[in-house]
Amino acid sequence: MSELTKITLSEQDIPTAWYNIQPDLPSPAPPVLHPGTGQPVGPDDLAPLFPMALIGQEVSQDRFIDIPGAVLDVYRLWRPSPLYRARRLERALGTPARIYYKYEGVSPAGSHKPNTAVAQAYYNAAEGTRRLTTETGAGQWGSALAFGCAQFGIDCEVWMVRVSYDQKPYRRTMMQTWGATVHPSPSDLTSTGRAILAGDPSSSGSLGIAISEAVEAAVGAVDTKYALGSVLNHVLMHQTVIGEEALRQLAMVDETPDLLVGCTGGGSNFGGLSFPFLREKLAGRMSPTIRCVEPAACPSLTRGRYAYDFGDTAGMAPLVKMHTLGHDFVPDPIHSGGLRYHGMAPLVSHLYELGLVEAEAIGQLECFAAALTFARTEGIIPAPEPSHALAATIREANRCKESGEERVILTALCGHGHFDMGAYEAYLAGQLEDFDQPEERIRAALDRLPTVPV
Ligand SMILES: Cc1ncc(COP(=O)(O)O)c(C=O)c1O
């Protein structure tokens, strides 16, 4: 077995194509519906929001899609990303498991999000878009898009969920440094924001509300389109560079994973890591268990309903079939801003229904404890979002300690936590609490799901 700690690829090894899982699915995912008519959407319905190239990728049945040269040129700034063997963590846990983590915090914005932000900015610029609007929770996606837009010379306007806007002022400055304009959401700049503020002037916001604001600002404005940082098929596909690299890196040290774990907000880092492995599994070449980890405060897979719902709070975004807590569900203000989304990617939801991936929910206290154990052994301070995957990894490593099994665990460390010191400070001061959602609150939000004609 290799003695390497850091398994690296050379710049020539950056994948040159994204993997599209759609043609390999045992059955197709249900169609996306128009929010007004409830009928399947066509390209023209989506054209006010997205450039045609991305609309094409959303429904493509091509197994691989070439990555444009201009996107690869930007990827070269940080890709390929390293795969680490977590030797110090293993030793501290006393586990016979072998733990690997794919680290995406080496990107300029500090997370996996630039893998799609750069691609989306490129395709928009190529089709003449002058301005992109978006939402951001933790600030990771907004900063990734700000960086991507700066690379291709387009303006970027970001609605940042109020609770993160207040908790993470330096993420805001980071976006502004790359040239973006940032608003707290809900804002008084859109009719959605004004309506929410009228009902609750101190609303902490949610990703669903911020999406509505960004969509509203894009629709009807000249040369402006909207970019989403997760959930959609093309976004998950852009992230598959993570899994494609990890496949090669594990092969370099002669390892095959028994378990993959990734945190799931909208599903993009999880899909990015796991889909290439799922392809191998479906082809019978390996058989890892693949597990999503979500926050107990926002448990869309483990406690939500698989139903058609709006992607945003105001009901302007298309209807997609997904595991959802209801489009107007506002999760408690946990510190993993990127995991506070009411729904889950349709592809991840579909795979969950098919039994090809599993899911568990973990409270934030266990996640922060895992993050500290990780930081004190491996050195890297994780973002609160991937601390969920680390908590699940540590659970599994402890199970291996009890059973004596030498399982190979692969996880996505999808971002660093350098801008999350407020969260760490609160945890260290004993000020964080776990939020377990009462059943009635989830049921009440699910009662307001839209009815659709299918
Ligand atoms: C570091 C990080 N991890 C994970 C997520 C969750 O998103 P996804 O499930 O699409 O990876 C976010 C979202 O903002 C994030 O910033």
Image (cartoon, rainbow, N blue to C red):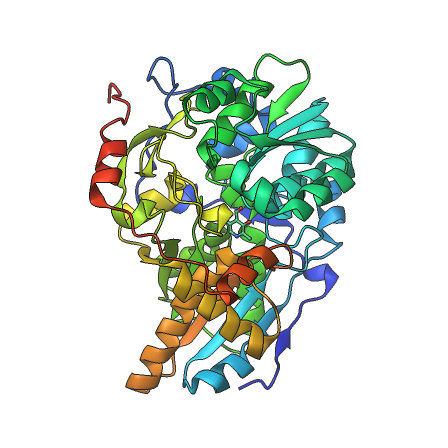
Q: Position of residue 337 (x, y in %)?
A: 50, 47
As drawn, is 22 to the left or to the right of 119? Answer: left
The answer to whether residue 252 of the structure is visible from this angle is no
Of residues 330 and 397, the one nearer the viewer is: 330
As drawn, is 317 to the left or to the right of 88? Answer: left
Of residues 439 and 303, the one nearer the viewer is: 439
User: Picture quarter containing residue 363?
Assistant: bottom left
Of residues 348 and 414, the one nearer the viewer is: 414
* Image point (72%, 45%), residue name: 174
Q: Position of residue 191 (x, y in %)?
A: 51, 16
Quarter occupied by the C terminus: top left
As drawn, is 338 to the left or to the right of 421? Answer: left
Q: In the figure, 309 relative to 117: above or below?
A: above
User: Picture quarter containing residue 223?
Assistant: top right
Q: Position of residue 399 (x, y in %)?
A: 32, 78
Q: In the figure, 260 relative to 435: above or below?
A: below
